[in-house]
Structures are given as structure tokens and as C-alpha cells.
Image: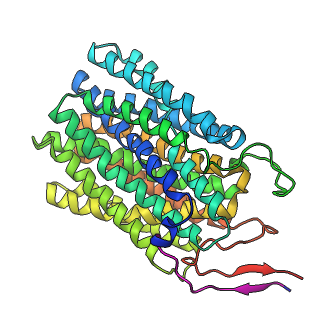
């Protein structure tokens, strides 16, 4: 008969950071993921400057996002099969060249189709550093109480990047040159990506599964729960994309474009603060329920953005929306550990990251068109619609987020406070 144990021990961030070898991939990993937070806003600001159209700027950014969404899972598969370094090194080189080409084409007034052509490789080659860092944590901490803490820590790191990245890109584009944000993005990608790729000691095992894992290789997308999470993360992407374009349009309307970075920074800061709290709380509710409740809060907060007509109110609402995103993101990434075998986790993480990028791409396009035609407030309708549709899907299919029957359940972290199977008859 199976026995269960519920642990009350509460490992924190300090214990997590003392994990042997962690800092060797965390520091370069942070530097390498920073450019991702700068890419979309850098494209929007540069192309809007050269074309005068938020719609055109959003379309170019959307091509980048769609390309990333389509190619990111393939990058994850290749990393699981051949190793992270083998994927990262050529990827960062291609990305730096493609972004540089996009900058040159925009500055010389090239037609929109030429910008689209350059945007495809720029998006397809975005280095998937976040998923790769998560895969390294999973390899080190699989089955330990620290895994849930690591998921929260990664969300905090992501959101800190999204606090710094858009503010930095906006400051460079408005204070130095409209192309400065993308130039900095390409340079950081090259340096940070190569530095991260050099950390071979912490790279997860790769190649065909061994007899010890006893898990045949299959696509992470074949897991029903992963498909549900992809839809949920599409809605989260609609928030990021809709906010970036609509905040830019709003600050242009009020004649204070410099406030764009501040407003987006407040939004991302809310996300970061919620992420810190998520890792510090000993949760009594399971992750599926937390995901549904957190997503409901996100949809409710996003539905109010279009009503804001002042910087103060928009900043306050943006903060609330940011506070609601972290619970959904962290819980989604935590569920991957229970749903997906270790041989496909990098791919699973990239499917979720790609879903955010795809949702962001669609939102940037639609919000850009709406902002051009009806003003910034109309652009904020996109996050409302995206999160509402994703929430409805999540409610209808939430049962698919349970691990398949027969899967061995391992502790995902004391934050979840769920029974852990330790033996069977």
C-alpha cells in the first residue's frame, strides 16, 4: 500500500542559491536572457519611428514573435537531443546578424516586406536561455523540495529582466538613437549567449534516453496538459504584447513618450514582486487550483486596462496586472515537472515560452492596428480578450493538467503541500 509524506520544511532562496554550480549558470543566464525583454519594444520603437505607423511596427514585431514561437520548440528538441551548447552557439550568431540587418533595413527606409524577411531569422534564432536555465535546475533538483522554489526564482529573474529590458531599450531609443535599443539587444545576445553556452559543467544530460530513465522520447506537445498550458500562456502573451504597444501609443498620445518605460517597468515590477512572494509562501492549495484562481485574477485585472485615461491610473492597473501574471507563469512551469518526462522538459519549457511569444505577436499586431485606428485605449482591449478566452479554455480543460495515471509522483516543492508517493505495495 502506498504511503504518503507531507513535508513542512520550507527551503528558501538562500538555500537554492547554495546549490553547487548554480551561480555558474545563473549569472550568464541572466545576461543572456536580458535581450529577449528588449527585442519587441526595440522593434516597435524603431519601426514606428521610421514608418510613422504603430500598425507597421506591430506587424514587424509580430513576425519576429511568430517565428520565435514556431522555432523555439524545435530549438528545445535539439537541445534535449544534442545539448544546449550545440544549439546556442550558432543561434546567437545568427540572431545578432539578423537583428543588425533589420536595423539597417529600417534606417534606410526599406519596404515593409524587406523588414518582414529580416524579422523571420531574428525571431527564429532568439536563444531560449530561460527554458535552458529551467532545464538545468530540473536536472539538479528533480524530486527535491527546492524545485518549486527554483520555478519561483526563475519567474522573478524573468520579470527582473522585463523590468530592466524595456526601460533600457526605451531609454536608448528615445535618448540616444531610435536604433540603439536593438543594437544593444544584438550585442547582449552575442556576449551573454556565448558566455552561457560555455558553462558545460551544468548542462543537462542529452541524447537518447538511457535504460535508467526508462522513458521513450516523445514530443512534449503530445501531453494533453502541456497543450492546455500552451493556451494559457498564449493569453499571457497577449498581455505582454498588448501592454507594450498600447503603453507606447498612450504615452505618444499624451506627449510624454519617455513615460513608456516607466509604465511598463511598473507592470513588470508587479510581476517580479508577486514572483518573490510565490516562492516564499507555503501553499496549502494544489497547483491546478492556483493556476485557475491566478488566471481568473489576471483576466479580471486585464479587463480594466482600457478604462484608464491617466498615467497614475494606468500605472496602478498595470501594477495589479503584473501581480496577477506571476502566479499563472510560475504554476504553469511547475506543472511541467509533473506532466513531462525529463527527456522532453527543455522542449516543454520552450513550447510555453513560444506560446507567450506567439500570443505577444498576435497582440502586438492587433493592438497596433487598433491603436492606429481608434487610439491607445482600444489597444488595451486585446489583453482583455486574450485572457478571457484563455481562462474559458483553462476552466473547461483543467482536468487535463493532472499527471497521467501510473506516473510516479515526486515532490515538486513544499510550497505545494501535496502528498508525495514514497512507496507502494
Task: Give percent across and percent down for residue 351.
Answer: 59, 46
The residue sitting at 44% across, 22% down in the picture is 97
Q: Quadrant of residue 273?
A: bottom left
Give the residue at the far left of this rendering: 255
Give the residue at the far right of this rendering: 425
Task: Give percent across and percent down for residue 44.
Answer: 30, 33
Horizontal side of 48 relative to 350 (left or right) equals left
Quarter of the C terminus within the rendering: bottom right
The dominant secondary structure in magenta is loop
Horizontal side of 311 relative to 18 (left or right) equals left
For the record, the magenta segment spans: 2-13
Residues 384 and 255: in front is 255
Question: From where the camera sits, is residue 34 visible?
Answer: yes
Residues 295 and 87: in front is 87
The residue sitting at 27% across, 39% down in the picture is 169
Say whether residue 12 is magenta.
yes
Q: Quadrant of residue 91?
A: top right
Q: Say above or below: 6 vs 377.
A: below
Q: Say above or below: 275 vs 235.
A: below
Task: Give percent across and percent down for residue 1.
Answer: 86, 86
Amino acid at each position: 500500500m502506498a504511503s504518503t509524506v507531507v513535508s513542512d520544511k520550507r527551503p528558501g532562496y538562500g538555500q537554492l542559491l547554495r546549490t553547487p554550480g548554480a551561480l555558474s549558470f545563473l549569472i550568464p543566464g541572466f545576461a543572456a536572457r536580458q535581450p529577449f525583454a528588449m527585442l519587441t519594444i526595440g522593434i516597435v520603437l524603431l519601426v514606428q519611428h521610421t514608418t510613422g505607423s504603430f500598425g507597421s511596427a506591430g506587424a514587424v514585431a509580430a513576425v519576429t514573435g511568430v517565428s520565435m514561437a514556431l522555432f523555439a520548440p524545435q530549438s528545445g528538441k535539439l537541445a534535449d537531443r544534442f545539448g544546449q551548447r550545440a544549439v546556442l552557439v550558432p543561434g546567437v550568431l545568427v540572431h545578432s546578424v539578423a537583428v543588425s540587418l533589420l536595423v539597417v533595413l529600417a534606417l534606410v527606409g526599406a519596404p515593409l516586406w524587406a523588414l518582414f524577411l529580416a524579422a523571420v531569422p531574428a525571431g527564429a534564432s532568439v536563444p531560449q536561455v530561460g527554458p535552458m536555465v529551467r532545464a538545468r535546475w530540473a536536472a539538479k533538483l528533480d524530486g527535491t523540495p527546492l524545485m518549486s522554489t527554483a520555478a519561483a526564482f526563475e519567474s522573478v529573474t524573468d520579470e527582473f529582466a522585463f523590468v530592466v529590458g524595456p526601460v533600457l531599450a526605451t531609454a536608448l531609443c528615445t535618448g540616444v538613437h531610435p536604433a540603439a535599443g536593438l543594437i544593444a539587444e544584438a550585442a547582449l545576445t552575442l556576449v551573454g549567449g556565448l558566455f552561457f553556452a560555455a558553462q558545460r559543467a551544468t548542462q543537462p544530460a542529452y541524447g537518447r534516453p538511457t535504460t535508467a530513465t526508462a522513458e521513450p522520447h516523445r514530443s512534449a506537445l503530445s501531453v494533453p496538459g502541456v497543450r492546455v498550458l500552451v493556451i494559457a500562456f498564449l493569453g499571457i502573451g497577449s498581455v505582454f504584447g498588448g501592454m507594450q504597444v498600447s503603453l507606447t501609443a498612450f504615452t505618444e498620445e499624451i506627449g510624454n513618450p519617455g513615460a513608456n518605460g516607466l509604465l511598463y517597468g511598473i507592470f513588470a515590477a508587479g510581476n517580479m514582486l508577486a514572483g518573490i512572494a510565490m516562492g516564499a509562501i507555503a501553499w496549502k492549495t494544489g497547483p491546478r487550483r492556483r493556476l485557475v484562481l491566478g488566471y481568473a485574477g489576471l483576466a479580471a485585472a486585464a479587463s480594466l486596462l482600457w478604462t484608464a485615461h491617466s498615467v497614475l491610473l494606468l500605472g496602478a492597473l498595470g501594477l495589479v496586472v503584473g501581480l496577477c501574471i506571476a502566479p499563472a507563469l510560475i504554476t504553469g512551469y511547475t506543472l511541467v515537472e509533473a506532466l513531462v518526462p525529463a527527456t522532453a522538459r527543455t522542449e516543454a519549457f520552450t513550447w510555453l515560452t513560444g506560446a507567450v511569444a506567439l500570443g505577444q505577436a498576435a497582440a502586438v499586431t492587433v493592438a497596433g492596428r487598433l491603436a492606429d485606428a481608434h487610439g491607445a485605449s482600444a489597444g488595451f482591449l486585446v489583453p482583455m480578450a486574450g485572457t478571457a478566452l484563455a481562462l474559458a479554455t483553462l476552466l473547461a480543460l483543467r482536468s487535463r493538467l493532472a499527471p497521467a495515471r501510473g506516473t510516479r509522483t515526486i515532490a515538486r516543492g513544499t510550497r505545494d503541500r501535496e502528498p508525495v508517493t514514497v512507496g507502494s505495495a
